Amino acid sequence: MKTVLTAVVMLFAFTGSVYAAININTATQAELEALKSAGITTIKAKAIIAYRTKAGAFKYVDDIEKVDGINSHTVDMEQLRTAITVTGPTVLRK
């Protein structure tokens, strides 16, 4: 029984993290703005798109801090890091 419960908990843990992933390399402005609770505004979403257009794809999630205006003073970096990815499709919560 303990093994089954552990398996169910792990399934939900992995599903939740995949379910909320926004790929910062391919997301549209509207998809990036879905990160509003982490502090991504319209201006910051535009800055992310401008940065990746100029500098190329983000290699690591932490590269998001290279974008002007995105840092621990203006954005909830912990929440943002858990909500973004640099691979795979963008999947928004409903």
Image: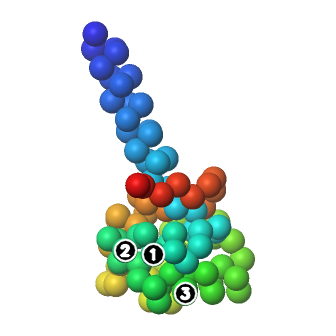
| x, y percent for residue 88 | 63, 53
Q: Does residue 49 appear to the left or right of 84 in the view shown?
A: right
Residue in view at x 44 percent, y 39 percent: 14
Identify the mark at residue 33; answer none if there is no mark. Answer: 1
Q: Observer-nearest residue: 31 or 13?
A: 31
For marks 2 and 3 on the same chain, the one whose residue lies earlier in the sequence: 2
Residue on which disc 3 sits: 47
Q: Is residue 5 above or below residue 87?
A: above
Residue 44, position in %: x, y? 47, 85
* Horizontal side, residue 59 vs residue 7: left or right: right
Work out which quarter of the rendered image holds the C terminus and state it. bottom left
Residue lying farthest top? Answer: 1
For the residue labelled by badge 3, is the local secondary structure a helix, a strand or a loop? Answer: helix
Q: Which secondary structure lies at badge 2?
A: helix
> What residue lies at 30% left-to-right and 20% top-to-bottom?
5
The reply to whether the C-beta atoms of the residues labelled 1 and 2 are less than 8 Å apart is yes
Say above or below: 59 vs 91.
below
Tell me if 44 is positioned left or right of 77 in this view: right
Amino acid type shown at disc 1: Glu
Q: Is residue 66 visible?
A: no
Q: How many marks overall?
A: 3
Label 1 sits on a secondary structure element that is helix
| Eye-nearest disc, 3 or 1 | 1
Residue identified by numbered label 2: 36
- Quadrant of residue 28 in the image? bottom right
Q: Amino acid at mark 2?
A: Lys
Res 59 quadrant in image? bottom right
**The N terminus sits in image quarter:** top left
Q: CA distance from mark 1 to mark 2?
A: 6 Å
